[in-house]
Image (cartoon, rainbow, N blue to C red):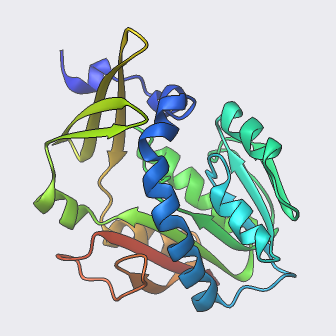
Amino acid sequence: MSIQQKISPAWYEEWFESEYYHILYNARGRRDAKLFLDNLNSYLKLYSKQQILDLACGRGRHVNYLASIGLSVTGIDLSAPSIIYAKKNATNNASFYIHDMREPFGDNSYQIILNLFTSFGYFEDIKDNIKVITNISNALTLHGKFILDYFNPNYLKQHLVKQEIKKTNDITFHIKKNIQDNFVYKFIKFKDKGKDFMFTERVMLIELEQIKCWFSDMNLQLVEVFGNYHLDPYCSNTSQRMIVIAEKC
């Protein structure tokens, strides 16, 4: 049986709703989120009257940080437990809703839409990705901006760490990665409270040229591409991230 056949098409629902997802990635989120958002804020020159959407917001760390500096921010996510957590910990000017990004989420409603920390490319069917881009374009006001923060597929293919071990909160995560059929797979195994667990991530390898084509079809014009959270210039071979800024035209 192939790897693809073993993985549920909705793997992200099970994994993102697990407490272990947040344990594994919590340290990275704290380290990178503020740096990235401060740099984005300086670049975009955000201001309080703008309506900002964080698409696939998780537990709301980006939303709450932006709201804490006086911005009006909405977060949506498919995971009910994440949104429940986000609502309990919401700051002023922050709103949260359960929503599938494949379903429409506004009509000329937002000046800024964020999709951060590789919160895209989960779907097996490429048509679902196109649905999301369509919804983003429809939800943006004219000249509104969309920020897509994705891994650089060229860098990932050259520097894929096939096996690693991470220990956090007294849990040892054994992680294996491979690439098949234009997807990168991550298999996460660990033991906690006497039980064995295994979760899987599967994210599409999406080239910048493909993103440009999708954007162009949906009236989104490429403005800038950055290669890291410091917003340094993007290099297809050496940049770890592919942070794409587009404007609705």
Quarter that holds the C terminus: bottom right
Residue 8 in percent (x, y) is at 41, 22
Look at the image and tell me whether residue 75 can be seen.
yes
Seen from the viewer's position, the closer of residues 139 and 97 is 97
Relative vertical location of residue 33 with respect to residue 50 in this rendering, above or below? above
Q: Tell me: residue 172, above or below residue 234.
A: above
Q: Nearer the viewer, residue 181 or 173?
A: 173
**Compared with residue 51, is residue 124 higher up or lower down, i.e. above or below?**
above
In the image, taking residue 70 as reference, residue 161 lies left or right, namely left
Q: Which quarter of the figure has residue 147?
A: bottom right
- The residue nearer to you, when weighing 70 against 77, is 70
- Relative to 137, is 39 on the left or the right? left
Quadrant of residue 134 in the image?
bottom right
The residue lying at 11 percent from left, 61 percent from top is 158
**Left or right: residue 102 compared with residue 198:** right
The image shows a total of numbered marks equal to 0
Residue 165 image point, x, y percent? 22, 38
Q: Nearer the viewer, residue 101 or 27?
A: 27
Q: Quadrant of the N terminus?
A: top left
| In the displayed structure image, the side of residue 154 where residue 136 appears, left or right | right
Give x and y (percent) for residue 46. Answer: 72, 85
Residue drawn where x is 20% and y is 41% of the image: 181
Q: Position of residue 150 (x, y in %)?
A: 40, 63
Q: Residue furthest front?
A: 170
57 shown above or below 232: above
Residue at x-position 76% and y-position 36%: 84
